Image (cartoon, grey):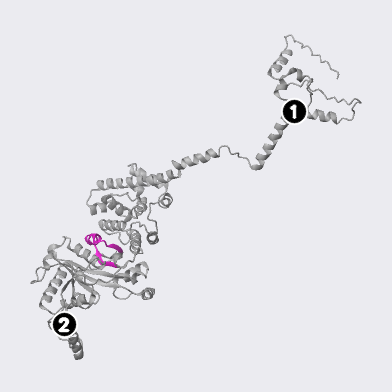
């Protein structure tokens, strides 16, 4: 890839004129619209540059003009002050030129982007005989490496003055002669008095990129009418779509789009602006597929959606992920059950499962296809979950663009039964994935493994812990201790209780009887105290079933009543 010196190109030299004719002939054969203004812009616009891709044998054959394989025209844009951008946007106006900075700043409401500097690829023209062989992509790749600062000068000479002048004393004298001619022409009347004639000494027409000083840029972009082939071409070059015009071009019937690629190595500017804008563009495009882009070809729509998903990748930088989430309005992680409930209820999941098992018609789940398609194309499913290209196209056409099955048959060229079969397989896979997400979250709430062992150990420690309060436990313990103490006071050791001789002399009576006896004032003169023996008294026994039957037999007619003798009780004198 070589840089074309415009002073040498428009020097009216014989070889320069022949090279310019080849270049413009390539423009005419490769582009649908060409005007004389394009030639004037190429010669006069200070921000425009031209690069040509030549064959490797171009340097060896110096006697003839080399054949041009591809031409790339570039315009430098950006470096607009923030105050100027905000003032223009506040009035609803935009200045001429700087197409990408003004459009992106207006669409995203971000005045910081206009402060960045970049290069817009105006045209890429490839020779008709070598189109489709990768020369255009090769030219874009070399141009990206040049602006990204990857081109290293093999001569080791980085002096910008030498590069611009070509080096040598002869070039210095040439430049002085040119300056003298310009001063003399200016005295005659400026541009009108200038005499167009071939110059004797000219700067090199073609300069290798290793001998050209690259400006410091932040992005490399382009603006094209979007078609399926053009989108695939720029997608292979690493471009990401940031803007897509909702109205079609009156001449071509295409939607104008803006694509860009960051140049981080050259400037070191890394604040995740590109993936954040891509995430915002993805959200807008998915929403507009049911409106302005409803008639877009499903293949092109699917290609754009796939490009969005490949361009938004979670980064290790937290600030980058926060910027992406702020622009997209959602997280980059897999959807949770709580978020899923905002889109699909458990009854909706049941309907989807029934259709996946061929137990109902597809009309039963038509209302659920839109939220399912939004979740899938927004990247909220698992990272390893993928549908086939045909299944994705059907989900995009039916779920996002609200197209009928018959219209998709015509676009994809597939029979109706095959379309419905592939669509059913896609819904079944998505149903299984959604059910798996719900099951994983439910199983995470259950204890298992190490957490279960820890819970069991805690429960084992709490096994013997009383459910009573501290006061209740203390009161119960006090009562139990007092009871045991009283029993120990009123009882004798077992060795004494078993000895019948000693037990003859045991003093009978409990504390209550002795207290009552000692409280009696009538104590005889000998000081003897007597207590009542309660052991001789018989307590009344409750009647049981046997006693009731005996009483019934006594009073039954025809039977001899047995009279039970009364027991005689003898009173013992104390």
Task: Measuring from the top left, give residue 450's x and y in whole percent.
Answer: 45, 42
Q: Which residue lies under the disc numbered 2?
A: 174
Quadrant of the drawing holding the C terminus:
top right
Residue 490 numbered mark, or none: 1
Residue 333 forms part of the magenta stretch: no
Q: Which residue is drawn at 32% across and 73% down?
A: 79
Quadrant (top left, top right, bottom left, bottom right) of the N terminus: bottom left
Task: Say few, some or many: other residues with alpha carbon within 10 Å of mark 1 (under 14 / 14 to 19 / 20 or more).
Answer: few
Pick the residue in front: 295 or 181: 181
- Which residue range is magenta in the image? 219-242
Relative image position of residue 196 (x, y in whole percent): 14, 84
Q: Residue 342 carries which label?
A: none
Which secondary structure, mark 1? helix
Q: Which residue lies furthest to the bottom in this view?
A: 187
Tell me what residue is drawn at x 17 percent, y 85 percent: 177
Instruction: Residue 472: name its quadrant.
Output: top right
Q: Which residue is drawn at 12% across and 68% down?
A: 59
């Amino acid at each position: 890839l070589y840089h074309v010196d415009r002073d040498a190109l428009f020097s009216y030299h014989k070889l320069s004129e022949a090279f310019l004719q080849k270049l413009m002939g390539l423009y005419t054969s490769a582009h649908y619209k060409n005007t004389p203004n394009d030639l004037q812009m190429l010669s006069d616009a200070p921000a425009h540059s031209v690069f040509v891709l030549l064959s490797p044998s171009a340097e060896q054959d110096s006697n003839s003009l080399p054949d041009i394989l591809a031409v790339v025209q570039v315009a430098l844009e950006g470096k607009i002050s923030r105050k100027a951008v905000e003032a223009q946007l506040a009035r609803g106006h935009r200045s001429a030129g700087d197409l990408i900075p003004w459009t992106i700043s207006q669409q995203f409401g971000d005045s910081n982007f206009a402060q960045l500097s970049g290069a817009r690829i105006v045209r890429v023209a490839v020779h008709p005989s070598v189109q489709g062989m990768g020369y255009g992509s090769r030219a874009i790749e070399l141009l990206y490496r040049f602006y990204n600062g990857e081109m290293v000068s093999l001569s080791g000479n980085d002096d910008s003055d030498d590069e611009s002048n070509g080096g040598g004393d002869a070039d210095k004298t040439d430049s002085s002669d040119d300056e003298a001619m310009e001063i003399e022409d200016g005295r005659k009347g400026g541009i009108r008095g200038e005499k167009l004639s071939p110059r004797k000494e000219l700067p090199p027409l073609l300069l290798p990129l290793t001998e050209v000083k690259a400006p410091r840029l932040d992005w490399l972009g382009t603006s094209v009418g979007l078609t399926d082939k053009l989108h695939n071409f720029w997608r292979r070059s690493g471009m990401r779509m940031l803007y897509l015009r909702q109205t079609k071009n009156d001449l071509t019937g295409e939607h104008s789009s803006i694509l860009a690629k960051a140049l981080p190595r050259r400037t070191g500017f890394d604040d995740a602006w590109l993936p954040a804008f891509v995430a915002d563009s993805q959200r807008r495009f998915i929403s507009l597929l049911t409106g302005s882009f409803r008639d877009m070809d499903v293949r092109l729509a699917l290609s754009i959606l796939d490009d969005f998903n490949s361009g938004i990748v979670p980064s290790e930088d937290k600030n980058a992920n926060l910027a992406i989430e702020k622009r997209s309005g959602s997280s980059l992680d897999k959807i949770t059950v709580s978020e899923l409930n905002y889109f699909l209820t458990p009854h909706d999941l049941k309907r989807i499962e029934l259709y996946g098992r061929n137990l109902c018609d597809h009309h039963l789940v038509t209302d659920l296809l839109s939220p399912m398609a939004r979740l899938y194309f927004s990247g909220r499913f698992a990272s390893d979950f993928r549908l086939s290209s045909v299944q994705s196209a059907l989900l995009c056409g039916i779920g996002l663009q609200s197209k009928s099955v018959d219209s998709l048959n015509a676009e994809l060229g597939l029979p109706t039964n095959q379309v419905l079969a592939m669509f059913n397989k896609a819904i079944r896979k998505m149903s299984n994935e959604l059910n798996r997400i719900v099951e994983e979250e439910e199983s995470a709430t259950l204890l298992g493994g190490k957490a279960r062992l820890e819970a069991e150990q805690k429960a084992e420690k709490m096994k013997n812990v009383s459910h009573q309060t501290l006061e209740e436990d203390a009161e119960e313990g006090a009562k139990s201790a007092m009871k045991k103490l009283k029993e120990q006071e009123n009882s004798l050791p077992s060795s004494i209780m078993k000895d019948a001789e000693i037990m003859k002399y045991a003093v009978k009576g409990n504390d209550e009887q002795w207290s009552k006896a000692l409280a009696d004032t009538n104590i005889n003169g000998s000081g003897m105290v007597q207590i009542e023996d309660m052991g001789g008294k018989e307590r009344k026994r409750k009647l049981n079933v046997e006693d009731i039957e005996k009483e019934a037999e006594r009073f039954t007619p025809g039977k001899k009543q047995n009279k039970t003798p009364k027991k005689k009780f003898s009173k013992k004198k104390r």
